Each structure stands twice: as C-alpha cells, then as structure tokens.
Amino acid sequence: MELILKAILMGIVEGFTEFLPISSTGHLILVNHFLHLPADFAVLFNVFIQLGAILSVVIYFRKELIPWGIHRSPEQKEHVWDIWKKTFIGVAPALAIGAAVGEFVEKILFVPEVVAAALFLGGIFLVLIERRKNSNKIQTLAALSYRTVLIIGLIQCLAMIPGISRSAATIIGAMLLGCSRTIAAEFSFFLAIPTMMAASSYQLFKNFSTISAGEWQVLFVGFAVSFFAAWAAIAFLMNYIRKNDFTFFGYYRIVLGIVVIAYFTFAVAP
C-alpha cells in the first residue's frame, strides 16, 4: 500500500510538471530522494508514467494530431500529416544524441545538485527571454519551416541534462526563433510524443522480463494518475499563456533551485 501511495504522488508530480517549463525529471529525482523508490525500479517507473502524460497530449489535441475521420477534408488531413512530419524531424536530434550518450548522462548527471543548478539557470533564461522583444512572426504550426523545426530539435537536446526541462528547452528555443508562446507550447507538447515514447519503450524492453505483478500494479497506478494530472496541466497552461507570459515559471525555477541547493548544502551535509 505504501508503494501505491508513492506511485500516486509521483504520478501527480510527473503529470503536472511534464508539460510545464519546470522539469518533470528534475522534480521526480528530487521527490524520489525523499520517497526512496528502489533505484532500478525508479528509473523504469519514471519513464513508464510518462506514457500517461503522452496519452493526455494525444487526446487533448486529437483534432490537431489524428488525421482520420469522415468529417476531415483532404486539406485538414494534409495539415495533420505535416504536423507529424515536423514533429519527427524535430525529435530526430534528441533520438540520435540520446542513443549515443543517454546512459552516460543518466549515470553522471542524475543527481539533485545538477538538477538544482539546471533549475536555477533555466529560470534565469526564461525570465530573460520574456524581457526581450519577441517578433512572434510564427503564429501557426503551418508557418514552422523544417529548418526551424530541426533547430528547435537540436535545442531540445539540452534537456538531457536533468533539471533543464524538455518543455522549457523547446519553448525557449521556439520563441528565440520567432514563435508565439502558444505555438512554442503546442509544438513542445507534440515533440514530447515520440521523444517520451522512445524513452519509455526502451526502458520497458530492457526491463520487461524482470517486472513483477506487484510492480505492474504500481506502474499502472502511476500511469493513470499521470494521465489526469497532465491533462489538467495542459489545459491550465494553454489557458494561462493566452494572457500571461512564462516569467512566473522562471522565478519558480530560480526559487526552487536555490532551495534545493541550500538543502543539499546544509541539511544533508556530512
């Protein structure tokens, strides 16, 4: 029962933080520092519950992402396939670089101190990007060029450093390249689908035979909780950015980074 409660808590954390520019991986590492899930299972659990968050994106944006349907015109279907092509072009750099150095990064950098520093620096970047004048020349997904998509994908690779945030990296990159906040956020959601599917599938393939019946139960509880929490987070963010910028999230990251650095410097100092 205790493990189920931990799964619920971590599912909530994953769902609410995955698509906000505040680093879900960073939050999960920090939360697990206090919950103490078994190390090997924690890695699998963290990526598995991301599947719930991915499913929430597909369902929330089903009109933009699902090309089939008798009421869709040929032009609408072509637009949907264009989004998918851009999504896979954008995710290609992360898949290639992740396959090359992903395990090394996981072993070396997945520690609270790195997360804290990345949260802090990422927060500063978010605040600075909102203080500069953004041209907002790209107001629709159709206006995104393949070159721009590829550059956003390259910037997304910074998110392999835990605490940077895949969402923050893609949003900042897209806005620097002239995207409006709405388009930057939406494309960030879409890029998450193949990125997180690849990571989750890899971990499941690697660990499938060792997962016990009890662990499957914990995984699916986390999956379900993550789905509903992510749905709420997406709805919140899309409504929030209609009238607000990302400055609040920048300050949140800065404060959290300072708190975490202070905690691991003083509270757990030897």
Image: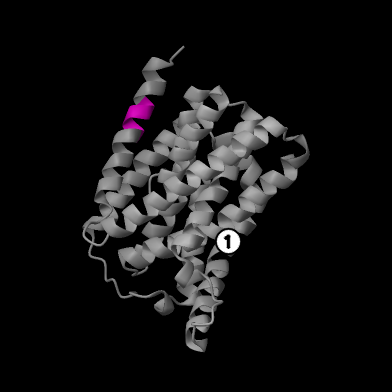
Q: Is residue 19 left or right of residue 4?
A: left
- Confirm whether the magenta stretch covers residue 255: no
- Confirm whether the magenta stretch covers residue 259: yes
Q: Residue at x 54, y 76 (%)?
A: 67
Please name whichever residue, 86 or 78, is drawn nearer the observer in this view of the structure. Answer: 78
Please name whichever residue, 225 or 179, is drawn nearer the observer in this view of the structure. Answer: 225
Please name whichever residue, 46 or 5, is drawn nearer the observer in this view of the structure. Answer: 5
Residue 5 placed where, x, y %? 50, 28
Where 47 falls versus 59 (above or below)?
A: above
Where 234 falls versus 78 (above or below)?
A: above
Where 90 falls versus 202 (above or below)?
A: below
The quarter of the picture where residue 269 lies is: top left
Q: Residues within 10 Å of mark 1 (few under 14, many from 20)?
A: some
Where 162 falls versus 180 (above or below)?
A: above
Whether residue 20 is visible to the viewer of this picture, yes or no, is no
The three-letter code of the residue at mark 1 reads: Pro
Q: Tag 1, which secondary structure? A: helix
Residue 59 placed where, x, y %? 49, 61
Q: Residue at x 74, y 41 (%)?
A: 208
Q: Residue at x 51, y 61 (%)?
A: 58
SS assignment for the magenta stretch, majority: helix
Q: Is residue 202 left or right of residue 270?
A: right
The quarter of the picture where residue 216 lies is: top right
Q: Which residue lies under the disc numbered 1?
A: 93
Whether residue 177 is visible to the viewer of this picture, yes or no, is yes
Residue 57 placed where, x, y %? 48, 58
Residue 148 placed where, x, y %? 45, 72
Q: Residue at x 27, y 71 (%)?
A: 135
Q: As drawn, which residue projects farthest toward the bottom?
A: 74
Q: Which residues are magenta?
A: 257-261
> In which quadrant is the N terminus drawn?
top right
